[in-house]
Amino acid sequence: MKLSAVYKSPKKVDTYLYVAKRDDFTQVPAALMEKFGTPLFVMLIPLNKREIIAGMDRNKLVLKLESEGFYLQLPPKVTNLLEGHLHGRQIDNIPDAK
């Protein structure tokens, strides 16, 4: 069974680092490690148990780990609801309230 170690960032909310071997950050660029902070171990995850891991297809994650030695999971982009609402009003040609 193939495993990946998962770490969370103490500096960046909802940011996780997946590495092929526990506590092996040799493949992770130094600049990334500096911005990520000291990795906090979360869990070992079996790569053959789920189809979707870290919001992506398991095979893509495995390829990333094999080719680069790590995968950085960033938080999803937060949609600004006000901007979306105003954009929708412009599309519908509804004048902005004053």
Image (tube, rainbow, N blue to C red):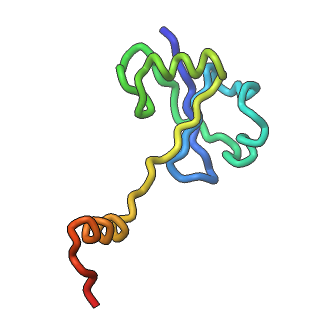
19 relative to 14 in the view: left or right? right
**Where is residue 18, by image quadrant?**
top right
Residue 14 at x, y percent in the picture: 50, 48
Residue 15 at x, y percent in the picture: 54, 45
* Residue under the image location 62 percent in, 50 percent down: 10
Question: Between residues 19 and 63, which one lies in front from this camera angle?
Answer: 63
65 relative to 23 in the view: left or right? left
Outermost residue toward the bottom? 98
7 relative to 48 in the view: left or right? right
Residue 39 at x, y percent in the picture: 65, 40
* Residue under the image location 28 percent in, 91 percent down: 98
94 relative to 42 in the view: left or right? left
Question: Between residues 9 and 52, which one lies in front from this camera angle?
Answer: 52
Residue 68 at x, y percent in the picture: 66, 22
Outermost residue toward the top? 1
Relative to 24, say whether 38 is above or below: below
Outermost residue toward the right? 30
